[in-house]
Amino acid sequence: MLLREEMNKRILILDGAMGTMLQRAELQARDFGGPEYEGCNELLNIHRPELIQQVHEAYLAAGADLIESNTFGATQVVLSDYGIPGRDRELNLAGARLARQAADRYATADKPRFVAGSMGPTNKMLTLTAGITFMELVESYYRQARALIEGGVDLLLLETAQDTLNIKAAGLGIQRARRELKQAIPLMISGTVEASGATLAGQNTEALYVSLAHLQPLCIGMNCATGPALMRDHIRSLAQIAACAVSCYPNAGMPDEDGCYGESAASFASQVAEFAAAGWLNIAGGCCGTTPEHIRALSAALADIPPRTIAQRDYAALSGLETLWIEDENLPILVGERCNVIGSRLFRDLVKAEAWDEASEIARAQEKNGSQVIDVCLSNPDWDEEQAMHNFLPQVVTKVKAPIMLDSTDLRVLETGLRYTQGKSVLNSLNLEGGADALQGGIALMKAYGAAVVIGTIDEQGMGLTRQRKLEIAQRSYAIFREQGIAPEDMIFDPLTFPVGTGDEQYIGGAVETIEGIRLIKSALPGVKTILGISNVSFGLVAAGREVLNSVFLYEATRAGLDYAIVNAQKLVRYAALSQEEQDLCRQILFETKAEAIAAFTAFYRDKSAQPAAPVARQTLEERLQMYIVEGSKAGLKEDLLLALERYQPLQILNDFLMKGMEEVGRLFNQNQLIVAEVLKSAESMNAAVTFLEPYLDKTETMDKGKVIIATVKGDVHDIGKNLLDIILSNNNYQVVDLGIKVPPEQVIAACRAEQPVAVGLSGLLVKSAHQMVTTAQDLHQAGIHIPVLVGGAALTEKFTAGKIAPAYAGPVYYAKDVMQGLEILNRIVSGTDGASAVTPAQ
């Protein structure tokens, strides 16, 4: 295809704003066909075609390779506001043909010109404003896409997208038009992210791409809303993850109080050229406020910069409002099981009573307590499951950021759910019980809406009980899904969890077979994921021991390669807190499943509480303080802190006992005995402890040592180290400006300029957080900020700091292994005695 060929040669230049040029023409009501149509620019395709032609040609003369048809609002949905919904086909055909004629007039053998059929977001948002159904929007976009294709456009451009659900509807409409016209016309998607860092419907840039990758766009990018300065991090993020081209066509800066855009052509072009020089762009142009002068300057600035290299990128991810990366360091991913009418009586009763708001609060509570995916199952013969999904899911998606797992055997119910989720969801589940043909409906939904899938190890012969049967069914299913173009990363195999304590002979040894089945599947099918409903293993056992057994089973399954665990995160007992006796009792049941083992387990837990004991029972006060942190418990914490204050200074309590607890948490995490959700619980206990101690901490001096900006870097929500540093610095006469979590580089830059700090502290727990520190350092350097930067976090090392972060930054970079060292470094900086203690960039 000629368009792809040209994209490989150079960065293609898109035109500038149609609306800005039309405003210059000082149009009258008669130009639109009468006062009732004033403002409907698409009618100018009929009433003032020569004007539209002039605008197209002005941009082509300025160097544009791609021009957009004047059809941004030419859908039935928008035209209904003017009382002319039936003229959508006429206006799209006219707009496409005008642009086609202009492009053909300027095209040469060396510089072909192309037409993008502009498709705006409409004036409806399925996620927020509604006023339209999903399928009505599909129909409206279908009609527009068909007319644009028939009018001769080279690609379809879904632009200024504010709601990913709208784009999914548009995608279905476009796919229908393609099928009917038998034309595989490419698709370009351009989202609009506000200054807040998210779309109006709440998604961030990475989630936008992950949610829409199934549409296989030729290009994805950003336009409108902001000038280029505020697009930097968003464009970089897309360039890092997109397996397609990336575009950027910003406004000419931010509008002033009169709605005027003040970014000059030269300034605009130089900023976009920085993105291109960094290797992020394949297509660049302008949006609101840009003119042929901007496009001419941009064309010249990008003329000698090669386009971004497009590469295949294989990774596993889901999305809600934010992206959930399925990475080894985060496993297992916890799937909340409480929005399931089969497993939760409370939830079932709320659904039966149609108390949708209260029911959706259960989803919110699960996310708050560590669930990273929310499972939704509404299957019950007492009500209409599809209607229940229609009523319940809109409540959930406005309350949680997490991805949704839609749990049903009814494809109609699954599709209803998909029409309310703008992110990339999971279908739970498909299997071979009805044969290969029975999978096709679910696969079609995956491809149409963009979803991952849980695949049970069940076939026509029944459930796979042995590890070999589980593998054979998984291999057969895998082949079918791969033939249909489903990526391995989107297949989540469920090797099935069976109860070990019911005495049922067919399940004897079932836990071992499941664990080993995970190992075999992960080894034989690289890239696929696995999932288990953990609590099934303890069904029928004494209540007090169930969560303990679940914990040991989860630990062993994770060691075997488990990626997702369906659990009640709030009741999850941490494996590291279990005694050796408890671990042994559980392993005897899991790996031997003899009657004697079940009897011993039952006897041990018969008279125990269903809740794990708080660490108050530990031998000494000092041990208890440490174990509050290790076990993530707050029960009795304040009382013991008061006792400790009678014996020790507050700083000694912090350093000698609480910090040792955090060190142990880090050790257990590195040994996979704690999962991320449990680390967060420990962080909550640590935060509670330091907050309690803060009033008792004496300020060491009276002088003001200056401001320090601290932040957990973009993509990371872990703030225990940062929060602790805040308290320590505040009590040592520093003014701390805490930017919070998931802080993008531009926010750090803005704070540095506004606050004029003596240093910046960057924190993060994950491996990718260390790499984000490199990016933040690069942006600080690019912005001309060279103040001292301190970095710290569990995955960070001094070697990485020297080899990656320090070389990216012109100012001094310091590695702080803990908060006390961070305080020492800052004291040396402000006193001018830091000497050569900054990390030296590795050569």
Image (cartoon, rainbow, N blue to C red):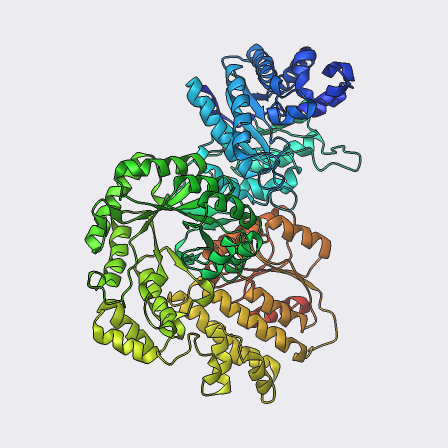
- Give the x, y percent position of residue 586: 30, 72
Q: Nearer the viewer, residue 622 or 413?
A: 413
* Residue 721: image location, x then y, percent: 55, 66
Q: Residue at x 72, y 53 (%)?
A: 754
In the current view of this chain or complex, which residue is farthest to the right? Answer: 258
Is residue 580 visible in the rendered image? The answer is: no
Q: Residue furthest bottom?
A: 647
Q: Image check: 665 left or right of 694?
A: left
Where is residue 765? Give x, y as percent: 49, 61
Q: Quadrant of the N terminus?
A: top left
- Asked if one can make out residue 357 in the rendered structure from this viewpoint, the answer is yes
Which residue sits at x=19%, y=63%? 505
Residue 458, percent across and down? 26, 48
Front residue of 428/624: it is 428
Q: Name the residue at 60% across, 66% down.
A: 723
Compared to residue 617, the image places residue 387 above or below, namely above
Q: Nearer the viewer, residue 663 or 578?
A: 578
From the viewer's perspective, tell me whether residue 1 is left or right of residue 266.
Answer: left
Residue 139 against residue 723 in the figure, above or below: above
Q: Please state which of residues 28 and 695 is positioned toward the viewer in this rendering.
A: 28
